[in-house]
Amino acid sequence: MSKRLKSLPLSYKVSGIFIMANLFIFLVDIMLLVGINSMSVEMEETYRENRHLNELLDAIEGVQRAMTEYLDSKSTDSLSDYYISEQKYSELASQLQTQISSKTDDRMERNISYMSEDYLKKVALTIEAKRGRNVEKYRIQYEEASRLYEYIRSYIRSLNAEQFISNSIRYNSLSEDFRRFEFFAFVVMVVVFFASAFIIIRITRMLIYPLQALAKSADEVADGNLDAELPKISNNDETGRLTAAFAKMMVSIREYIERVRESMEKERQMQEKELMMETHLKDAQLKYLRAQINPHFLFNTLNAGAQLAMMEGADRTYEYVQTVADFFRYNVKKQDELVSIENEVDLVDNYIRILNVRFSGDIHYDRQTDKRLMKLKMPGMILQPIVENAVNHGIREMGDKGHIQLKVFKDEDRVYISVKDNGKGMSREDIDKLLGGEWKYEEKKGDSNGIGMDNVIARLKLFSERDDVIDIVSEGEGKGTEVIINLPYETEE
């Protein structure tokens, strides 16, 4: 929950603070209003009984007045007024306390209720006797009703006076409680106001603190202190992301300054070495010229040997020396150039001839090439190192049983060159290491041209601009090895 809260946007946090503060104040106000309303209702209920007694007194006076008017006039209107007054009084009298109680007020209400029943009966008998023209009867009933009327009025007034005194005391007590509650509500509102202000200020400072720390660090950086302490990232909101971006920027600036400093230091060292390099320039140039002269001297020497062999009639010696000269001439000139497949195949032929002279024809070699593909271009010095590896690490120990086969063929839009031997074979682990550049054969001095398989694979990838340019297939130990080169089929250079 804490992580989720820290990840909320700053606008949500600020809005949430004010919403929670206002909601808290609103709830406190509601509680105070409920308390005030409850006390107000209680104060209003204080004189409810007095109001009821006053209404009861007015109602019984209305009954008595309606009865007297009917007895005097015997009119329909006065009779209707009587029925209305009698109904109203009956409803009010039914609300009086009739249960037995030890309280004086309750006993007086019960007496008023009972007398009201008798009074209404007497009034009804009086009206009935008047309508029946029984003068003696309605006179007696009228006198008894009037006597009860006076008793009831007296009881009601007496009870009303007693209840008014009691209710006044209660009302004064409620008024004092209400004033105390008002003061309490005022104190609560003041406390809530200051507490809300304190909480809002405290939380707002917590939210603004990262910005203040960031501003302080930015001021130090502006004054030139690039080693100023970076503010800590405590939230994932806008301030946190801004702080992280500032910290990342400062780290980048420091790294850039460090790189510039290192670059200037290296440049200074290079300037110091420049004078030393100038003194060795002539020696380097002489060595370079000597490196160029040595191959030509070798070729001239081999050619001289070939001429001598021809003059003496040693045709095989002449052919061997001439083959060796062509082989080394190709090595020097073609390694960094694009050549034809035909050139590469011819180099392999020369290499096999040289080896067969050295090993008395022990290596059996045949080739199957598609003449239509021989003019296609490929990097130089690719096939000879592969054949060399097949000889040195495949069939060297097999005597005259060793066999190497070279094929050039086309399949769809790709040209394939296969070099296959019947030698020792390779394990899957060694194949993976060789293709991945993690393992190399140990070349014997004098038997290698110095170009390893990693060099061959790297140049083929660069030429084809893809990774699947070479594959090595072997069924296991003693079952031979086949290296397959995969080249694009392009008719133009």
Image (cartoon, helix red, strand yellow):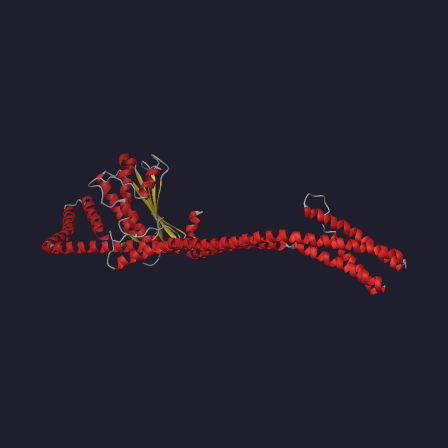
Q: Quadrant of the C terminus?
A: bottom left
Q: Answer above or below: position of 357 versus 54.
A: above
Residues 119 and 318: in front is 119
Q: Is residue 285 visible?
A: no
Determine the residue located farthest toward the right in the rendered image.
133
Q: Is residue 301 visible?
A: yes
Q: Answer above or below: position of 398 versus 260.
A: above
To which quarter of the image does residue 219 belong?
bottom left
Residues 442 and 256: in front is 256
Could you tell me how many numbered marks the image carries? 0
Residues 198 and 71: in front is 71
To which quarter of the image does residue 286 belong?
bottom left
Image position, residue 253 (x, y; %): 27, 56
Image position, residue 437 (x, y; %): 30, 44
Judged left or right of residue 152, residue 434 is left
Residues 407 and 161: in front is 161
What residue is drawn where x is 89% and y is 58%? Answer: 135
Judged left or right of residue 321, residue 479 is right
Image position, residue 157 (x, y; %): 70, 55
Judged left or right of residue 318, residue 147 is right
Image position, residue 450 (x, y; %): 22, 45
